[in-house]
Image (tube, helix red, strand yellow):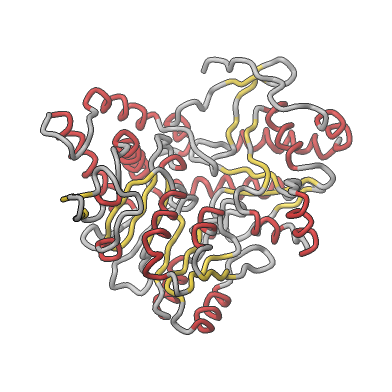
């Protein structure tokens, strides 16, 4: 498929939004790392399914039986997409990646609470905070913000068998760096640890292969979210070895988790059903499966190639703008996803984000992106600066982030670059204009597609 036709697959790409000058402009979404719009095929599949929707695992009515079959079939679709062995692994449906990681942390706690968990300095809070009830340590990053495999090996050696889990992001939501997950897995297994990959940013943009259980490079646990892969209907995924969940009580006991209950006895269902308490989000799972089928048809290699082309095009243009600092290495495009963070000297990241939206209809993200320790390192903040921030509660430090999806184009990047050049050329004027403005000053109904 021609890359230009990807745009036709996504809902809302031609929406016009109000600008601060009173006109309407073409909406440009460069905030795909936060969430993505739905695919048209996903919306169509959801609408087709809704007349047949019913509660799963609960009844013999036709709709319930059909919904149950579709729901269970989706586990195989997910497994195939990331090459997880369905005989060895369980696929547990949750709300999002954050819930998936918290669920795993809760369920492993009794087993690993006296051991060490290694996270990294580049993690999203969702793959850091849930592990802080354990004995946690952090794998360092280098001056560019890339993961240090040398430090991983050093810490595995230092703890001498006490590390039971290494947990790291597949790709950074700030710099876009892709971590060498299979090399990290090989190291972890060599020292008797398992590995969790937070795939929220990686799975939507690159081929992912968990590899067979007998491979030293296999991924033990994988998490990701549907809303970052064009199916924003409230579903996430946790994949892991069945044996690790089989004898562990659910972290959320309740309806759907038990086989037999008396006042004195509880027999849990086997995983994954005991780990999906309450009525599951069947519609969201159907949406995820539809998105996976469409992305598979496009080919994840093709998607990655297209987004790499956009990334290199943007990096080349951004690097030519004076007084603009990019927080990533512009080389090695095959080792990154389409996420780029930057700052403009002398103008706050929030003001830059507002200008892009209010004057260009360009949606970006700004701040610390739920990864404050990583941002502090990238900004080279001193210990004193960090302590002052903690003391004052300041949210001032941060960056501007652009992130690409399959539907973005070079022409959209050109619009961004043109406006950034204007901002750089008149920083003082823009600060004077935008600093006093309150949020939501320009809200009006959006224009029809």
The part of the image, by quadrant, that contains residue 348 is: top right
In this rendering, position of residue 413 left or right of residue 275: right
Outermost residue toward the front in this view: 263
183 left or right, relative to 340: left
In the displayed structure, would residue 389 be above or below residue 288? below
Residue shown at the point (29%, 41%) measured from the top left: 278
- The answer to whether residue 248 shows anywhere in this view is yes
In screen coordinates, is 162 left or right of 247? right
Q: Which of 361 and 434 is in front in this view?
A: 434
- Residue 243's x, y, as percent? 26, 65
Q: Where is residue 28 in the image (x, y as percent from the top left)?
A: 60, 31
Say which of 247 and 19 sits in front: 247
Residue drawn at x 75%, y 27% as measured from the top left: 438
Q: Quadrant of residue 54?
A: top left
Residue at the farthest left position: 60
Residue 93, percent from left and from top: 33, 46
Q: Quadrant of residue 280?
A: top left
The x, y position of residue 137, in whole percent, is 56, 71
Q: Nearer the viewer, residue 164 or 263?
A: 263
Is residue 406 positioned above or below 338 on the image? above
Residue under the point 50% across and 36% down: 407
Residue at point 41%, 74% (across, down): 193
Q: Is residue 269 visible to us here?
A: no
- On-image quarter of the N terminus: top left
Please tell me whether residue 182 is drawn above or below residue 90 in the rendered image: below
């Amino acid at each position: 498929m021609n890359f230009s036709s990807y745009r036709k697959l996504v809902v809302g790409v031609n929406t016009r939004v109000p600008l601060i000058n009173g006109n309407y402009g073409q909406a440009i979404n460069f905030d795909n790392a936060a969430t993505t719009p739905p695919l048209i095929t996903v919306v169509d599949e959801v609408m087709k399914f809704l007349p047949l929707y019913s509660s799963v695992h609960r009844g013999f009515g036709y709709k319930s039986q059909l919904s149950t079959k579709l729901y269970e079939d989706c586990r195989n679709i997910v497994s195939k997409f990331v090459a997880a062995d369905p005989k060895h692994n369980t696929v547990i449906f949750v709300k999002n990646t954050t819930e998936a990681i918290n669920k795993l942390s809760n369920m492993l706690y009794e087993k690993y609470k006296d051991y060490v968990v290694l996270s990294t300095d580049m993690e999203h809070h969702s793959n850091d905070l849930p592990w802080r009830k354990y004995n946690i340590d952090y794998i360092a990053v280098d001056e560019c913000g890339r993961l240090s495999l040398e430090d991983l090996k050093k810490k595995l050696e230092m703890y001498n068998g006490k590390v039971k889990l290494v947990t790291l992001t597949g790709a950074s939501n700030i710099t876009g760096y892709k971590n060498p997950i299979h090399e990290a897995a090989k190291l972890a297994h060599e020292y008797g640890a398992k590995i969790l990959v937070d795939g929220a940013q990686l799975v939507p943009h690159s081929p992912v292969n968990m590899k067979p259980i007998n491979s030293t490079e296999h991924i033990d646990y994988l998490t990701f979210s549907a809303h970052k892969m064009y199916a924003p209907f409230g579903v996430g995924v946790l994949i892991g070895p069945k044996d690790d969940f089989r004898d562990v009580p659910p972290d959320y006991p309740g309806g759907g988790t038990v086989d037999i209950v008396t006042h004195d006895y509880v027999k849990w269902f086997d995983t994954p059903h005991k780990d999906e308490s309450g009525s599951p989000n069947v519609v969201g799972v159907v949406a995820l499966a539809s998105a996976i089928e469409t992305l598979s048809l496009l080919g994840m290699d093709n998607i990655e190639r297209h987004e790499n082309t956009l990334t290199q095009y943007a990096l080349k243009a951004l690097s030519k703008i004076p007084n603009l600092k990019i927080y990533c290495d512009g080389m090695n495009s095959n080792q990154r996803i389409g996420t780029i963070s930057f700052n403009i000297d002398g103008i706050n990241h929030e003001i830059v984000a507002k200008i892009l939206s209010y004057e260009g209809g360009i949606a970006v993200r700004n701040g610390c992106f739920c990864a404050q320790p990583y941002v502090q390192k990238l900004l080279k903040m001193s210990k004193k600066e960090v302590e002052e921030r903690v003391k004052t509660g300041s949210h001032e430090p941060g960056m501007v982030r652009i992130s690409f999806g399959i539907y973005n184009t070079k022409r959209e990047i050109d619009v961004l670059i043109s406006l950034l050049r204007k901002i750089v050329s008149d920083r003082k004027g823009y600060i004077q204009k935008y600093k006093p403005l309150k949020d939501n000053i320009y809200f009006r109904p959006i224009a029809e597609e």
